[in-house]
Amino acid sequence: MTANPYIKQYLMTAGPTPVPPAVSQAMAAPMLYHRAPAFDELYARVLGRLPAVFATANPVLAFTASGSGALESAVANLVGPGTRALALAAGKFGERWIGLCEAYGADLITHQPAWGARIDPAQVDRVLEHEGHIDVVFGTLSETSTGVVHDIQAIAEVVGRHDALLVVDAVSGLGAARMLQDEWGVDVVVAGSQKALMTPPGLAFASVSERALEAARALPGGRYYFDWART
């Protein structure tokens, strides 16, 4: 069935979201060769503006991938066999952290309240205290499957006291919910282009602290396309 061009179409879904007319018009421009100076200039301009979106001084890495690709980049760079990881999951995409960590051989601990629950920072503190040393904690800013926004600021404070890295899935939250990466002390924030950023699907982003980059450099092998050092 052909859409009526005189009736505005609405996407009432969790994503992708509608894009502004200016974005659609920009997509109609002639294709750029990705090794041409014009593309280099455009790419540098975009990368230069992204840190403000993440509220960070970190460089923001960009991949051609889905939001799940952004998540996998974090796990691929920070998790190997035996890495002590804690995944906080209260919905479908929190559970994706679990699947990714298992795929990369983590020594995985999970904290899984019911779907729709808000992660309690005090409970995270108790888990970290009980488990001893944890290398990296994976959490979610806004859980698409339930609509719950988690208190990343408080979680970051707890994780920082235990000297673990904190990685946050902000695929559906960045641009819609408050996310102050540097101020809150979040090591890695990953996101995608297709939700609150109001651009088409296809780009994944990772804002990575120097501490997380150092941890990635110390983790041998096991990745290529998502290797932060190559991006």
Image (cartoon, rainbow, N blue to C red):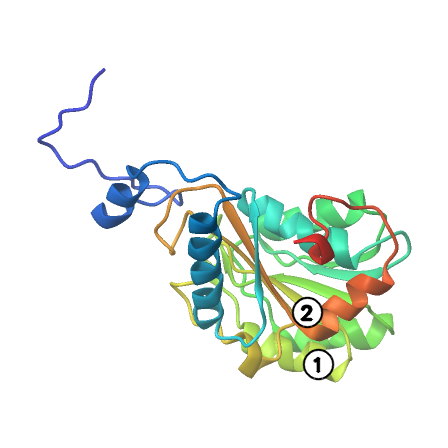
Q: Position of residue 26 (x, y in %)?
A: 29, 45
Q: Is residue 84 visible?
A: yes
SS at circle 1: helix
SS at circle 2: strand
Count of numbered circles on the image: 2
**In the picture provided, is 118 more to the left or to the right than 224?**
left
The reply to whether the C-beta atoms of the residues labelled 1 and 2 are less than 8 Å apart is yes
**In the rendered image, which quarter contains the C terminus?**
bottom right
Residue lying at the far left of the rendered structure: 6
Query: Which numbered disc covers residue 166?
Result: 2
The residue at the point 63 percent across, 62 percent down is: 139
Dot 1 amino acid type: Gly
Residue lying at the far right of the rendered structure: 82
Write down the residue under mark 1: 160
Judge whether 129 appears above or below 116 on screen: below
Residue lying at the far front of the rendered structure: 37
**In the picture provided, is 141 more to the left or to the right than 201?**
right
Dot 2 amino acid type: Leu
Q: As rendered, which of 226 and 154 lies closer to the eye?
A: 226
Judge whether 195 appears above or below 57 on screen: above
Judge whether 188 appears above or below 194 on screen: below
